[in-house]
Amino acid sequence: MTSFEELNIEDEVVEALAAEGIEIPTQFQAAAVPVIAKGRDLMGRAGPGAGTMIGYAAGLLSRLEGGAGSPVVIVLCTGVRQSTELARSLAAIAEACGMRVAALSPQWNLPQRADFLFVPAEEIGALFDGSVALTALKAVVIHDGDGLLRTTPRDRLDSLFNEWPPDTQRIICGQPFGSDLATFAAGHTKRAVTVPPMAAEGRGKRSGPKRGTLTLHVVDGTRDETALDAVVQLLEEPVRHVVVHALSSDQAADVGDFLSLHGFHCGPVGDPDVPVWLAVDGEPMPEFSATHGSVASLSYSVPSSSDAMLQRHPDRGPAAVVSEIRELAHLKVVAREAGFDVKRLRPPRPIRVSSRIDELGDRLGELVTSPSLTPYYLLVEALASRFTPSEIAAAALYQLDEGPTAAKQPPKPDTASWVRLFVTAGSQDEVGARELLGAITGESNIAGNRVGRIDVREKHSLVEVRQEDAKRVIDALNGTTLGGRAIRVDYDRAHERKSAPKPGPRRKPVKS
């Protein structure tokens, strides 16, 4: 497919998408939109990065009408953050089609009267108690099925789906679309079309020869800033040009303006006078000769499929991609299918200038990676409003190296009561102590100094918090997305079992 017009959806939907720079459907969208527009149930084996939200929204906006005063479409999400982000992303497109979007949270005015309502897992009770009228409901969507099943009791979801009329359209999406989700979807859909049409165990397997390594730049700040850093690192000898691949011409123009603002002038592919070439998905890729020197490729957005990955990153030079944490699951799948290994870029070590500074640098490196450092992030943020980062770093180095003896004394032991929480995200999800601290303080609104040791393991993490904050953190984080998937947080039961007193040895009864 080369455009949404070929998908036989309403013209106003095509125009609304084009106004937001969305002109060429992804592989998932091209397959899913016609099915949904016809009112068929769908099981979508896709997640963030594949164009999932537009994949179901375009078809529903084309076939349904709003204005009933209650939701026509319910989208179930894993948490408040996800529901809010999705609602904001769809709002302008839906409004152009005459439908109102909202998320079920206090930040939205009268959300229960919206046509398209995104409902976080913790607010599902509103669909049972009558807070949200369902008399006009025509379709229900599960945006992240694997995450929703991890954060919501299965019997609660079963009851909800069983109460809806049989003719309610059901759209269930997820990645990796595990066996539990597949069983749930099969029991609550009718003759559903599966997109893409392949067995779950086939997803993620390498489908071709190994092609090399794809360097991953995780978004830290804005996507434009991360892309700029990637371009700077790619433009090293012998690379003379970087092809930046964008989803649309509008996206290419925006990133081109940002890069040009920093002196990296952009032009079409093959222009020998500029270091950055801009390419748009779906448009023919011009040929360029070896006289241009070595050429690297950078995906400004995550490729939507393995085919898109291969078109953007052929075997001809260094390859890199910019990705948000929530897109990592999708990226790893399509990269593996295309034959790429994904390697996350790590910051280089500082240049050593003397043995004394070398020792200081090693000590700083140990401190930076220590979980005990996490409460000090809040202090640095407060100082940043009055001083530059360089001034703060210089003062910290002075304190560490030559400060008063009294300041170097170990702090008094903290006698406050702490508890340890179990978090279902670890290093294999590209999650570190910094990401966990940000999620805890951001979602539960507690101060950083109320978070203690953060121990990141391969598949999970252990986090210490003040006892009085524990339930607040658990309630706030359950269902949020971290490391590209929904997380579950609970008290660390293993720790409780270990700390419980063990029973003494059994004694034989004494005969009387």
Image (tube, rainbow, N blue to C red):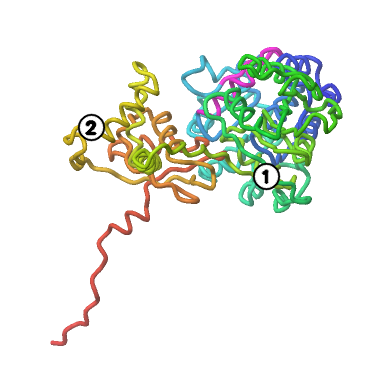
Residue 342 or residue 170, whichever sits in front? 342
Contact check, label 2 and label 1, Cβ < 8 Å: no
Mark 1: which amino acid? Answer: Thr
The residue positioned farthest toward the left in the image shown: 512
Residue 213 image label: 1
The residue positioned farthest toward the bottom in the image shown: 511
Lower position in the chain sequence, tag 2 or tag 1: 1
Observer-side mark, 2 or 1, equals 2
Q: Is residue 285 above or below residue 194?
A: above
Q: Residue at x 70, y 20 (%)?
A: 251
User: Which quadrant, please, contains the C terminus?
Assistant: bottom left
Q: Position of residue 64 (x, y in %)?
A: 73, 21
User: Which quadrant, please, contains the N terminus?
Assistant: top right
Q: Is residue 227 left or right of residue 169?
A: left
Q: Which secondary structure class fits the magenta region best? A: helix
Q: Is residue 386 left or right of residue 87?
A: left
Residue of label 2: 403
Q: Residue at x 72, y 33 (%)?
A: 297
Residue 476 or residue 170, whichever sits in front? 476
Q: Position of residue 32 (x, y in %)?
A: 77, 34
The residue positioned farthest toward the front in the image shown: 354
Q: Which stretch did the figure color magenta? A: 81-102
Whether residue 83 can be seen here: yes
Numbered-mark total:
2
